[in-house]
């Protein structure tokens, strides 16, 4: 047993939100107990003790939508690069060139560096949406092997698309189906599989039908109405809006994640609500791609389960939390909005989303929940109370404030030392691969 104590314990548990000089008792992969440090030490005298040294002890953070495959684009200058004036051009000029050039070694080290960066930012669970049209087979298995090595909890999928032809689309379908079957055989509850789809505008009805058949009841992870071109394409080709088309194709439901949902109307929101489909908001990516601001706050008011992701823009969920807060204030011209909703998405709803896919609770300190716990260096200048924990997290912490990260009862980073891999060797190899990749892309 391990005790993590001598810190301010923020539980995300309504029964006892804050315990000053709190402590978490970890037994195996789960939380056995929590309470005051002195009480836990007395109750479990033989336990190993980790001293939080007055910092904050809290649940690990969850990213409900990311893109590991984008890692090697950082700092890259593509040959014959063109200026992109809209989202479709960004896809064509950058991201689709990147994913076509990836091979298994680059996929492996994209996973290593992205997951490591997440660990350092206190992210313990990642829902990733992968693409590598030039190397589809075994891509998800490669990422999963890295996640297993590093000790990160993850859900993976491959984005099926018709944009590279029928053969590549069929390979994507097979990769999803094979990986889902593999993930379903795992007993650790660390690796999960969803069925990935790119977006409506790169998927024919025939391919969607194939995907539904191959998924065999597994939920989907799909970009929905991110850019205006996705909507225009759906209306022109099918006479339906994007969410309507996905609904008619049997893609939506409580086990499915629809990402972005920017260019949707009230009818589509009703469909998302009625099907109990998860929607994930990615504020930084949406701003960076200039695709618009989702009506995330309105969707939450309608009862849609809204999560918070990064879309590959960053691995720092606290950064995304900060941006979500100010984006909606700015977009609506109302300083009173955004604060509560962004906290709800990150600190509550992402955990609720995980309940649909993992066997035990995540994102909360309670008995029986998975021991995904982080320790954050934070010396509060004002009192931390049951009513203001989100305010302290938003305004006082950032990802790099995280000192230690535990996943499933195992420290993967302790006192800023990565324990599950040689970080310097990983980044050295990653830079070597990236330089060659840039020449090829």
Image (tube, rainbow, N blue to C red):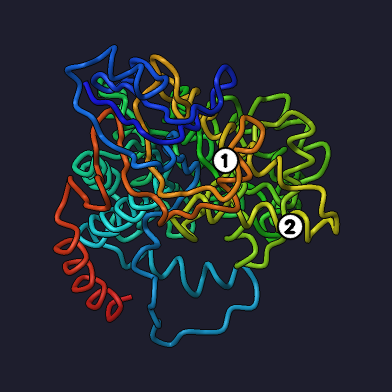
Residue 324: x and y in percent read: 65, 53
- Mark 2–mark 1 distance (CA, rounded to whole Å): 31 Å
Assign a secondary structure to mark 1.
helix
Read off the residue under disc 1.
346
Q: Residue furthest top?
A: 43
Tag 2 secondary structure: helix
Mark 1: give few (<14), some (14-19) or many (20+) Cα within 10 Å: many
Which comes before the other along the chain, label 2 or label 1?
2
Which residue corresponds to the image point at 38% horizontal and 14% vertical from the top-left?
A: 368
Which residue corresponds to the image point at 46% horizontal and 57% vertical from the top-left? 312
Name the quadrant of the C terminus: bottom left
Residue drawn where x is 74% and y is 28% of the image: 303
| Depth check, front residue: 353 or 346 | 346
Q: Looking at this view, is 99 or 319 the one in front?
A: 319
Q: For the residues carrying marks 2 and 1, which lies nearer the camera in this image? A: 1
**Quarter of image, res 155:** top left
Q: Is residue 259 above or below residue 18?
A: below
Find residue 289 and report its horizontal and vertical position in percent: 61, 67
**Residues at circles 2 and 1 in contact by the CB criterion of under 8 Å:** no
Q: Is residue 184 above or below residue 348?
A: above
Label number found at residue 232: 2
Q: Is residue 2 visible?
A: yes
**Is 255 positioned to the left or the right of 184 in the image?**
right
């Amino acid at each position: 047993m391990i005790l993590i104590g001598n810190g301010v314990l923020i539980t995300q548990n309504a029964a006892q939100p804050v315990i000053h000089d709190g402590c978490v008792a970890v037994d195996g992969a789960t939380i056995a107990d929590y309470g005051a440090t002195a009480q836990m030490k007395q109750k479990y005298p033989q336990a190993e003790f980790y001293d939080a040294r007055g910092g904050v002890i809290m649940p690990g953070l969850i990213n409900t939508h990311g893109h590991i495959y984008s890692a090697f684009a950082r700092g890259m200058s593509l040959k014959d690069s063109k200026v992109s004036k809209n989202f479709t051009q960004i896809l064509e000029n950058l991201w689709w060139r990147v994913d076509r050039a990836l091979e298994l070694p680059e996929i492996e080290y994209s996973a290593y560096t992205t997951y490591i960066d997440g660990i350092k930012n206190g992210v313990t669970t990642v829902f990733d949406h992968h693409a590598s049209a030039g190397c589809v087979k075994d891509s998800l298995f490669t990422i999963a092997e890295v996640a297993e090595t590093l000790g990160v909890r993850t859900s993976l999928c491959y984005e099926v698309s018709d944009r590279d032809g029928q053969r590549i689309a069929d390979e994507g379908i097979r990769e999803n189906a094979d990986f889902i079957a593999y993930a379903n055989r795992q007993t650790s509850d660390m690796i999960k599989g969803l069925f990935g789809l790119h977006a409506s505008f790169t998927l024919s009805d025939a391919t969607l039908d194939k995907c539904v058949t191959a998924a065999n009841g597994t939920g989907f992870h799909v970009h929905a109405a991110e850019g205006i071109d996705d909507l225009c394409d759906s209306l022109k080709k099918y006479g339906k809006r994007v969410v309507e088309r996905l609904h008619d194709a049997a893609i939506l439901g409580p086990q499915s994640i629809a990402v972005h949902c920017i260019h949707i109307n009230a009818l589509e929101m009703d469909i998302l609500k009625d099907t109990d489909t998860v929607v994930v908001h990615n504020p930084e990516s949406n701003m960076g791609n200039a695709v618009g601001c989702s009506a995330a706050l309105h969707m939450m008011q309608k009862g849609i389960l809204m999560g918070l992701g990064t879309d590959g823009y960053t691995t720092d969920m606290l950064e995304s939390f900060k941006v979500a807060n100010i984006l909606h204030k700015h977009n609506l011209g109302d300083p009173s909005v955004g604060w509560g909703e962004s906290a709800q998405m990150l600190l509550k709803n992402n955990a609720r989303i995980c309940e649909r896919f993992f066997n035990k609770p995540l994102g909360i300190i309670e008995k029986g929940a998975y021991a995904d716990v982080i320790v954050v260096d934070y010396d509060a200048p004002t009192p931390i109370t049951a009513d203001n924990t989100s305010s302290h997290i938003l305004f006082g912490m950032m990802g790099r404030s995280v000192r230690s990260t535990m996943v499933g009862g195992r420290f993967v980073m302790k006192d800023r030392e990565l324990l599950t891999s040689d970080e310097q060797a990983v980044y050295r190899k990653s830079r070597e691969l990236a330089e060659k990749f840039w020449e090829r892309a």
